[in-house]
Structures are given as structure tokens and as C-alpha cells.
Amino acid sequence: MATVTRSIDTLTRDALAVLQPGFTGTTAPDWLLHRLDEGLTTVALFGRNVHDPEQLAALSGRLRDVREDLLIAIDEEGGDVTRLEVRGGSSFPGNLALGAVDDTELTRAVARELGRRLADCGINVNWAPSADVNSNPANPVIGVRSFGAAPDLVARHTAAYVEGLQSAGVAACTKHFPGHGDTATDSHHDLPRITADLTTLQERELVPFRAAVAAGTRAVMSAHILLPALDAERPATLSPAALHGLLRAPVTEGGLGFDGLIVTDGIEMRAIAATYGIERGSVLALAAGADAICVGGGLADEDTVLRLRDALVRAVREGELPEERLADAAARVRALAHWTTGAGAGEGIAPAPGIGLAAARRALRLTSAAPCAPLTGPAYVASFTPLANIAVGDETPWGVAAELSRLLPGTETAAYAAEDAAAGPRALVDTLLTAAGERPVVAVVRDLHRHPWMADALHALLTARPHTAVVEMGVPQAPPQGTPHLATHGAARVCAQAAAEALTGRRPN
């Protein structure tokens, strides 16, 4: 058994320092303020904590009244994954749209403006960008969150995003190391397994992460994925071979030479929690080389914080977790907090409020096999709606109906899901066309290639109404169909606005 040479109070403070917990509500609960005073150094925010920028700035200010050198983290990728605009849709297109434009200066400018807005709200850590190469079209959780399927493209835009975000004083946390793109499983629900060999990992998954490290990313988030080529037993978050042996190892030894903060993905995700439990998972993650434990997306209470704090302290006392490892992790957290206090927090950056819409317009791709006229009167929008993954959530609206209604008052919409196709695609389409009447139909789909029921329903609709316009708001993997077919490369609000403008040939005054 290891000998504890420091006070339990110091161990407790270090254990609290490495946690990144969340909470419920739009004001700081007393228990959270109390733990900040005891050593908690990071607070995680989610959509449930956000009402508007003014409220968010007040919340951040209240937290910093207790601890000035506080890290306030959020999962704000822009595009489909937004917390700042969780109930209205993002003012920024996501990564796939930026990758489709392939202008690194634009990506840098979008990330800078996003960082400026975060900094204005008091947020100084963003769990973004996603540096995953979306090499598996069946991927249910990355998709439009990736810049694309080509490693070099993803690498240059990852670097640009990191530089833009950090120029605003907000630390980038590049994710999901060592790459979540080649999986058909969502780690929120189960443990994905990637069978790529080391050569493939080096030439594909790791290329964007090397670029992020070279660009100076202050943090990297680990993925809950099993890569037998690295570690046959433990997922990357819990694997010394992945974190210490690959991410931290010097470049001369085949590693990435990263010296910043390593953050775990949500420790309560089932890929970890269902196999190891959150307490043991947290201990193993720290022992493997992680420095901070993200928790609070699903578990957001004081009891969770105390359970993890006590588990880490107990692991040190029982010799399972080296005392020096916990101290090193806590020191890295505090070092990042120190960086943010001197990073400028967006000072001197000119606002660019229209940059997101400009990017969405540039990302739009229109294809039509036959001549088509702009919509001039009310339309019927049929949204074929897949089950939302947890990262995106189901709070954020998507589709083109709201934006199209602004340009064409009287436009109506309805959502159709897999259960609506249970009686067959023809029955679904009969219902849809009855509701549409004589109005032109706009069919909105999301990742058509991943959902057979959706593809069948769209085929039946186009057979019955060939001049239906189709808007793909996911990954445009399926061949274009419709008159016209629009690919937005994401479901952000600005992507919908760009599509509505293209469908009508009009822009709002």
C-alpha cells in the first residue's frame, strides 16, 4: 500500500480539481458554489443551463465570484450540436458545411466569432472541434459533426478552428481522440470497436489530431472506443497505451507529443458506465493519463461529484492511483485555468454577426435533373425525422419549415418518423399528399443513406409527385433526388435559412 504523504484535504482538493461536473437549472446551486470553495476548478454547462446570453453571463459571473480562476466549459460545436442556441438552432453551420466550402480562412473566422460569443458569456473552454474523420458512412453519432471523410481536409480545418477559437481566449478541446469516425456504434449507448490497424490509424484517424497539437490546442478529449491495435482490453479513455503511450509520447517515439489537458468524454456514457461504473472508470482514466473527468451530461447532482471525489481519494489511499498522477492531473487543470485568465477573452475582436449565414450559403449545393421554378406561394414541408442521437439532442429544432414560412407565409409542415412508415411507404405518402393538397411539397431528410424507411418513403413520394423538392440536411451520401435537390451539409438554423432562400429565390429584407 502506498504511503500518503500529503493531507487528505490536499488530496480532496486535487480530486475535486480534476472533475468537470454539470448541474441543473439556470442559476448556480448552493452545493456547487460550496464545492468551488473546496477546490472544484471546472464547471460544465449544457443546454439546460442556458436561457439567453445575458442570463449565461450572469451565471458565469456568479460562479467566478466564488472562484476567479474557474474553467467554465461547454459543448458548443455550432451546427447540429449547440447549447448557446439550443432552443432556436445555431447561427453557425457545423463542421461538414465548413469542410464542404473548404476555405480555412472562413473556418478560422467562424470559430473566432463563436469563441467571441462564448467569451462574452464568460465561457473559456469549448469541447470542440470534432477532429474525427467520418470514414464510415453508417456512423450514427459523428456525421455532419466531422469536417469530412478525407484526413488532410479534416486536419487543415481542425487546425484553423483551433486557431480561431483560441484567438478569442477560449481553450479548444479537440475530440474524440484517437478518432470516432470509423464506427457504426454510438458510444453513448455501447462500446464501439474499431478494427483498423496501426498504419491506418496513423494515416487516417491521427492526422487531424497531429494538426490540432501543432496548432496549439489546449486540450484533447478522449473517446470511449476500443481499438485492439492499441489496446485489446480497454477503451481509449482508460488505456495507458492510447493516452500516455500515444497522445503524450514524444513525436520521436511515434507519439503526438501533446502536453496539454486530456479530458475524458462523458464518464457516464454507457460505453464506460455500463462496463466499469463511473467511479472505477474515473480512477482508471486518471491512471491511464487523463487529467479531467467530464461528467454531468446525464448525471448532474452533488451526489455524483462526491462519489467521484471520494473514489479518487480512496484510490490514492489504497495504492490503486499514484498520488503523483492525481497531483499532476490537478496541476494541468490549474495550468489551463491560468492560461485562460491571461488569454484576452476575445478582447479587441470585431464582431462578425453574419459570418455563420455567409458560410451556410457557401456550403449549400443545389442539383436538379430538370428545370425548376422558385416557390412563390405557401408550401407543404414534410420532414422525415430520424431518432436524434444524444450528442445532438431533441430540444433543438431543425428543418426548413420555420425559415420557409418567413418567406412564404401560410407554409405548413408535418413530421414523419419510422413508426409512420410501419404500414408501408405508400400509406405514409397517401397521408402526406392528402395533407399537402395542391401545394408544392418540400421533403426534408437527414442522412437518407442510413435510414431505409426514409429512402423508401421518399422514393414513393417522388414517384407520386416527381416535382417535389428535396432538402438533405445530413451527410449527402445518397445520390441527389428531387426537383431540385439541396444539400445543406447540416441542420443548423442558418443552413435552413440558406435552403429557404434557394428554394424561393428570395432573401428576407
Image (spheres, helix red, strand yellow):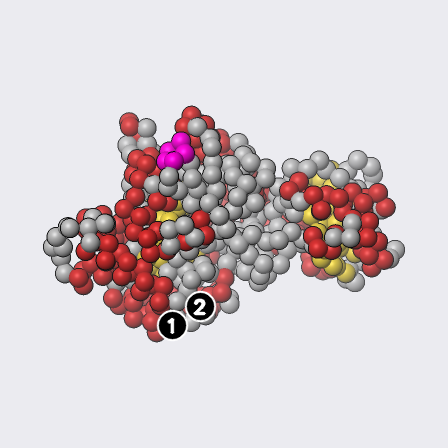
Q: Position of residue 232 (x, y in %)?
A: 38, 35
Tell me, yes or no, whether the highlighted magenta stretch contains residue 433: no
Q: Is residue 437 left or right of residue 42?
A: right
Q: Main secondary structure of the magenta part?
A: loop
Along the viewing direction, whichever of 217 and 304 lies nearer the viewer: 304
Seen in the picture, residue 375 relative to 487 is either above or below; the reply is below
Q: Residue at x 30, y 51 (%)?
A: 283
- Residue type at mark 2: give it: Thr
Residue 290 visible in the snapshot: yes
Question: Start and end of the magenta stretch?
Answer: 228-232
Dividing the picture into quarters, in which one does residue 228 lie?
A: top left
The residue at the far bottom in this view is 30
At 74% from the left edge and 59% from the top edge, which residue is drawn? Answer: 414
Location of residue 254 (image quadrant): top left
User: What is the quadrant of the C terminus in the image?
Assistant: bottom right
Q: Position of residue 383 (x, y in %)?
A: 71, 53
Q: Dot 1: within a 10 Å radius of its alpha carbon, few (fewer than 14), some, or many (20 or more) residues?
A: some
Kindly indicate the quadrant of the structure image that contains residue 361: top right
| Vertical placement of residue 18 versus 242, above or below | below
Secondary structure of the residue carrying tag 1 is loop
Q: Which residue is mark 1?
A: 29
In contact (CB < 8 Å): disc 1 and disc 2: yes
- Horizontally, residue 470 falls left or right of residue 193, namely right
Q: Which residue is denoted by mark 2 in the rendering?
A: 24
Q: Nearer the viewer, residue 311 or 215?
A: 311
Q: Is residue 235 above or below residue 346?
A: above
Q: Amino acid at mark 1?
A: Pro
Q: Is residue 23 left or right of residue 414?
A: left
- Where's residue 423, x and y in %? 78, 53
CA gap, disc 1 and disc 2:
8 Å
